[in-house]
Image (tube, rainbow, N blue to C red):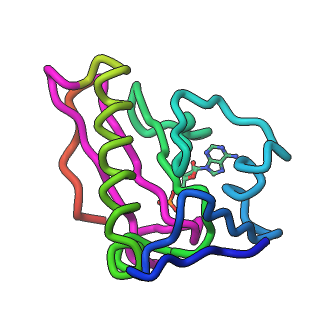
Amino acid sequence: MGQEITASGESSAADTTFEPGCIFCSILRRAIPATVVQETERTLAFRDIAPQAPTHVLVIPRTHAYPNAAELAAGDPGLTAELLRAGAAVAAAEGLTEDGYRMVFNTGDYAGQTVYHVHLHVLGGDALGRFGTP
Ligand code: AMP
């Protein structure tokens, strides 16, 4: 499936690139089930299968084009902002806004990234532990 790129270098709303071996692409294609909580034209939010907090939602773009947040930000700033807005909307819908929540992009092996289709973790629902140490 092709990817449309606008003159500004940002991918269009119709942008959908799928990678056969990618678990998140399978979720996007509805080839495997997920508990979807919100979606926009360019993003999908669904519950993490192994939650690390009472609320743990992943927000992904509907394209496999970007493996991590840095490449997404460099390649499509508009989609980067949309992913963050979608994360904030999930947090609001899940009732996390008042007490606070965490948004995380893991990047690479040392951060424990396991799926190389960029994804935003939205975590909350209780006081979260510190992070950054092994
Ligand atoms: P990361 O470690 O940052 O790459 O995050 C990948 C996340 O995807 C992990 O938190 C996994 O629990 C989650 N995950 C993997 N497979 C699925 C799935 N089929 N449905 C929902 N979440 C998944």
> Which is nearer the eye, 14 or 60?
14
User: Does any portion of residue 107 appear in the rendered image?
Assistant: no
Is 102 rendered above or below residue 118? Answer: above
User: Which residue is at a point 39% across and 52% down the rendered structure image?
Assistant: 83
> Which is nearer the eye, 1 or 49?
1
Is 87 rendered above or below residue 20? Answer: above
Residue 120 position, x and y percent, is: 41, 53
**Left/right of residue 112 with respect to residue 3 in the rendered view:** left
Residue 98 position, x and y percent, is: 14, 20
Is 22 rendered above or below residue 85? Answer: below
User: Which residue is at a point 34% across and 81% down the rendered structure image?
Assistant: 74
Which part of the image, by quadrant, shows the N terminus? bottom right
Q: Magenta residues? A: 97-125
Residue 62 position, x and y percent, is: 60, 56
Which part of the image, by quadrant, shows the C terminus? bottom left
Is 107 rendered above or below residue 23? Answer: below
Corner quadrant of residue 124: top left
Disc count in the image? 0
User: Which residue is at a point 56% across and 36% down the rendered structure image?
Assistant: 46
User: Which residue is at a point 44% across and 35% down the rendered structure image?
Assistant: 56
User: Does any portion of residue 44 appear in the rendered image?
Assistant: yes
Residue 108 position, x and y percent, is: 44, 78
> Which is nearer the eye, 117 or 72?
72
Residue 112 painted magenta: yes
**Left/right of residue 26 with respect to residue 100 in the rendered view:** right
Residue 54 painted magenta: no
